[in-house]
Image: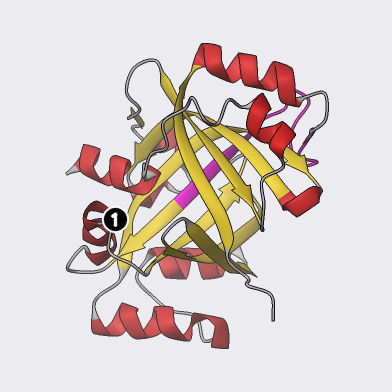
């Protein structure tokens, strides 16, 4: 059986490095089909954590394996709302998801549950450990894809955080920029191997890998 987990590497990069890398990879990688005419889309994710802030502390301490739950929308639209479970062990991640509607989304935002088999573990933690919405993580994403090994290279810029109550009403939110000045986040995801020409194009040996967590950064900023 194939391993469903994917490799996920993260790097802090400057705006200049982003432009340099894009200038190289655009010759053999395509923009994700969901990107707009400017090659971007906005990602907004409402993250959950329990009474003990277990997800936050596991990220800070590097605990493995660990699991996070979130609701995700794109470009502030409710046309597609996804409830996601992200599991991580070492440098590998597994994301599973199901679509929900706006009524179900607001039920989860208010601390309620949804009776589906996919969400059994979430509901158990919601009851036993008071799993509740904590923070919205929002950013602009520039996504590139490559078919071999299902490679995705994304540049996440303009990282913001705000209160979970405003998840579906972002225009009411007080948004806080949280990235260190002059730095953005590049993520490299793939199934088995990262092709050599992609490694060379992104100067992977010259960049410093990081365990940066957008969720942790946004939570710590708001504590």
> In front: 144, or 53?
144
In percent of width and height, residue 23 lies at 71, 16
Q: Is residue 28 visible?
A: yes
* Residue situated furthest top in the rendering: 16
The residues colored magenta run: 30-45
Q: Is 103 part of what is drawn in magenta?
A: no
Residue labelled with disc 1 = 59
Q: Is residue 154 left or right of residue 114?
A: right
> In front: 143, or 202?
202
Q: Please report the residue visible at 58 percent of the width from the left and 66 percent of the height from the top.
A: 5
- In the rendered image, the vertical position of residue 27 relative to residue 4, given as above or below: above
Q: Is residue 116 visible?
A: no
Q: Is residue 188 left or right of residue 164?
A: right
- In the rendered image, the vertical position of residue 52 relative to residue 71, given as above or below: below
In percent of width and height, residue 92 lies at 50, 60
> In front: 199, or 156?
199
In percent of width and height, residue 171 lies at 46, 34
Quadrant location, the C terminus: top left
Give the SS element for disc 1: helix
Q: Please report the residue visible at 32 percent of the width from the left and 23 percent of the height from the top.
A: 180
Q: Please report the residue visible at 73 percent of the width from the left and 26 percent of the height from the top.
A: 25
- Figure quadrant of residue 133: bottom left
- In the rendered image, the vertical position of residue 23 relative to residue 72, given as above or below: above
Q: Is 42 part of what is drawn in magenta?
A: yes
In percent of width and height, residue 46 lies at 43, 53
- Figure quadrant of residue 80: bottom right
């Amino acid at each position: 059986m194939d391993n469903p987990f994917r490799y996920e590497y993260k790097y802090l990069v400057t705006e200049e490095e982003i432009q340099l890398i894009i200038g190289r990879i655009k010759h053999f990688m395509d923009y994700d089909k969901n990107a707009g005419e400017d090659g971007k889309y906005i990602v907004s994710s409402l993250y959950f954590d329990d009474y003990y802030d277990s997800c936050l502390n596991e990220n800070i301490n590097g605990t493995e394996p660990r699991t996070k739950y979130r609701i995700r929308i794109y470009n502030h639209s409710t046309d597609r709302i996804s409830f996601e479970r992200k599991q991580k062990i070492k440098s590998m991640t597994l994301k599973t998801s199901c679509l929900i509607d706006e009524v179900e989304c607001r039920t989860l935002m208010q601390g309620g549950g949804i009776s589906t088999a996919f969400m059994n573990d979430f509901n158990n933690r919601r009851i036993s450990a008071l799993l509740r919405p904590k923070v919205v993580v929002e950013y602009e994403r520039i996504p590139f894809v490559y078919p071999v090994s299902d490679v995705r290279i994304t540049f996440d810029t303009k990282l913001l955080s705000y209160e979970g109550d405003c998840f579906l009403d972002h225009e009411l939110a007080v948004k806080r920029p949280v990235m260190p000045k002059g730095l953005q986040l590049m993520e490299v995801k793939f199934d088995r191997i990262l092709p050599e020409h992609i490694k060379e194009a992104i100067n992977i040996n010259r960049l410093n890998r990081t365990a940066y967590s957008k969720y942790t950064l946004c939570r710590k900023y708001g504590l």
